[in-house]
DNA sequence: AGAAGGACCTGCACGC
DNA sequence: TGCGTGCAGGTCCTTC
């Protein structure tokens, strides 16, 4: 479902709602593919932890957990565990009163000290859950953060790449967090055709792309993300950035800048939208 | 190295 | 109403 702005919105909402909660119990009930860490290990290790922080890294939601019983000494509480959630296409993390009816496709439930539950619901089951132990170090994600990356670092990512720039934007090992919507939207705003070879873009074009990507992502976060079908944040509210899409899923509609019909092609198996006149 | 295609899943919109 | 088709915010694997 979600790309960087949606995941950021969800993580912020969860942080506000469950920070400080103690995990009382943990239940996992899906096929093992959903669990990169065996369900039995998560069920054994999560109860008794306190949620100190919820944040986003790439498209991952990261729960920082500490020992709920730890006595506070002068030394900062050592990180005890991180619970990593990737929402895939349709994954949702919902906070609900424990009495409320369980929605279809709930694959994990954490019972919280307030009596509420954190529910992981995922119809298509592309989402993934994992536990990260201290010896593995802080989770850093597969690539670089698109927000705040320097011009030099951004250029270096694409230098010499013989792959379409859109495919490179979707490659999470380069930049993490960019998905299909924001790849198309940032390329439109930068005036670059999705099929252009990444390594052949000029410095000026790459600088424009970095700028466009940054502003699109910031704007989308500000509006709570894009709700294309059923995306909702941790409070159940929809985002509004879909109203700002200029090419994504606007096939055949006039370009908002020049009026040329927006074209849709398949690139790397993904629906790809662009204006044939504005993007060269 | 990278592209193309399929696999993994369910649900929805659409045409007939 | 029902069925078939195509499409979907993602990622991973194999083949060429």
Image (cartoon, coloured by chain):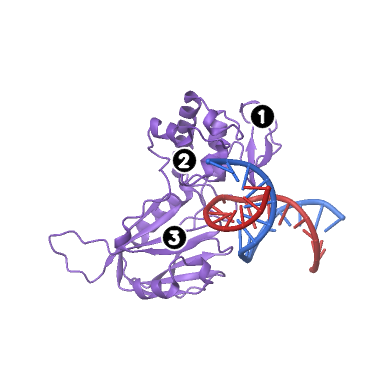
Chain colours: A purple, B blue, C red
Pointer 2: what residue?
A: A217
Residue in view at x 68 percent, y 39 percent: A264
According to the picture, the residue beneath numbered tag 1 turns out to be: A276
Discs 2 and 1 share one subunit: yes
Chain for disc number 2: A
Q: Label 1's element?
A: loop
For label 1, the crowd category at 10 Å Cα-Cα, with few meaning under 14, some 14 to 19 and many 20 or more, is some
Neighbours of disc 2 within 10 Å: few (<14), some (14-19), many (20+):
many
Q: Please tell me which of labels 2 and 3 falls first in the chain.
A: 3
What is the x, y in percent for residue A101?
52, 73
Looking at the image, the residue that sits furthest to the left is A74
> Is A134 rendered above or below residue B2?
below
Tell me if A191 is positioned left or right of A233 in this view: right
Q: Which mark is residue A85?
A: 3
Indicate the position of residue A199 as horizontal and vertical percent values.
Answer: 52, 31
In this rendering, the answer to whether A17 lies above or below A275 is below
Q: Position of residue A226 (x, y in %)?
A: 53, 47
Which residue is pictured at 36% across the width and 76% down the height?
A44
Subunit that carries the residue with mark 3: A
Q: Are marks 2 and 1 in contact (CB under 8 Å)?
A: no
Foreground residue among A225 and A151 = A151
Left or right: C13 as drawn, with respect to A177: right
Looking at the rendered structure, the secondary structure element under dot 3 is strand
Between A171 and A181, the residue placed more toward the observer is A171
Quadrant (top left, top right, bottom left, bottom right) of the N terminus of chain A:
bottom right
Residue A280, located in which quarter of the rendered image?
top right
Q: Is residue A244 visible?
A: no
């Amino acid at each position: 479902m979600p790309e960087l702005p949606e995941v950021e919105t969800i993580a912020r909402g969860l942080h506000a709602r469950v920070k400080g909660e103690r995990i009382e119990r943990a239940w996992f009930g899906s096929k093992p593919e959903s669990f990169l860490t065996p369900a039995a290990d998560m069920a054994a290790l999560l109860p008794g932890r306190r949620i100190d922080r919820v944040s986003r890294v790439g498209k991952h939601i990261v729960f920082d957990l500490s020992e709920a019983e730890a006595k506070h000494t002068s030394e900062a509480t050592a990180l005890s565990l991180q619970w990593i959630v990737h929402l895939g296409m349709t994954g949702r993390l919902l906070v609900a009163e424990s009495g409320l009816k369980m929605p279809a496709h709930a694959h994990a439930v954490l019972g919280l000290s307030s009596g509420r539950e954190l529910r992981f619901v995922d119809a298509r089951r592309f989402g993934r859950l994992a536990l990260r132990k201290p010896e593995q170090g802080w989770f850093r994600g597969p690539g670089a953060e698109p927000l705040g990356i320097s011009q030099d670092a951004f250029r270096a990512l694409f230098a010499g790449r013989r792959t379409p720039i859109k495919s490179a934007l979707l490659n999470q090992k380069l930049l993490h967090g960019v998905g299909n919507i924001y790849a198309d939207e940032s390329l439109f705003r930068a005036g670059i055709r999705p099929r252009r070879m990444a390594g052949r873009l000029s410095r000026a074009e790459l600088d424009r792309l970095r700028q466009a990507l940054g502003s699109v992502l910031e704007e989308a976060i500000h509006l709570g993300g894009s709700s294309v079908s059923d995306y909702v944040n941790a409070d159940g509210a929809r985002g509004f950035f879909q109203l700002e899409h200029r090419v994504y899923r606007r096939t055949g509609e006039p370009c908002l800048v020049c009026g040329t019909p927006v074209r849709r092609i398949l690139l790397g198996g993904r629906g790809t939208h662009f204006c044939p006149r504005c993007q060269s």
